[in-house]
Amino acid sequence: MAASPIAVGAGAAFLPRQPDEAFVMNVQRDEEEVGLELTWTIAPGYYLYRDEISATLDGRMIKLATSKGQFEGFGPYRISGIREVYRGLALADTVGEQLPERGVLIVTYKGCGQDTFCYPPIRKAIDLSTLSIVPPQSESLADAAGSVDDASRRLQE
């Protein structure tokens, strides 16, 4: 579902995108073939928080090297908090980590729509043998989609 305008009061609002449309994640092996390069293509009007990107393997935190983002103010009058965010593209590498050929890497990230709402943390599982990206078994895709549908309904009211 792409973002589409809807009338709300005197202004216009946008229906939120599904998380997988707002933040398209891709994964590939790094040049040394021991770690991974993660990239997110971020839809216009959305952003990811740099400090909300993390990864675990068998419950152990995996160190990620992330590219620099841009600092922006958030909250009332844009002064209640300054955070580093990505717009357009985000990059992260499992630098210095030799990952096994098999297993599941859990990647968690969080982003928002500009001047609207923030998604709950988004979790993806990467099968290290195939580099397939799937929802973690402990999370239902229907639950994540339900949160966005609920937000869409609230915007329409």
Image (cartoon, helix red, strand yellow):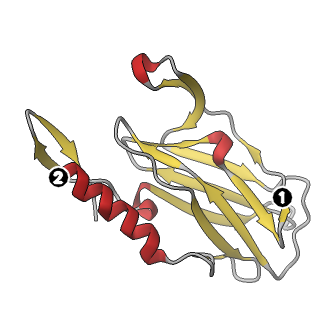
Give the CA distance from mark 2 to mark 1: 40 Å
Amino acid type, mark 2: Gln
Name the residue at 45% across, 64% down: 20
Q: Which mark is residue 62?
A: 1
Q: Quadrant of residue 77?
A: top left
Name the residue at 68% across, 62% down: 107
From this view, report whether residue 82 is shown above or below residue 120: above
- Look at the numbered disc 1 and give the secondary structure of its residue: loop
Quadrant the N terminus occupies? bottom left
> Whole-percent x and y of residue 43?
40, 49
Name the residue at 26% across, 57% down: 152
Q: Is residue 87 left or right of residue 70?
A: left
Q: Quadrant of residue 148?
A: bottom left
Contact, CB < 8 Å: mark 2 with mark 1? no
Q: Is residue 132 left or right of residue 87?
A: right
From this view, report whether residue 137 is shown above or below residue 26: below
- Look at the numbered disc 2 and give the secondary structure of its residue: helix
Say few, some or many: other residues with alpha carbon within 10 Å of mark 2 (under 14 / 14 to 19 / 20 or more). few
For disc 2, the marked residue is 156
Q: Quadrant of residue 94?
A: bottom right
Amino acid type, mark 1: Ile
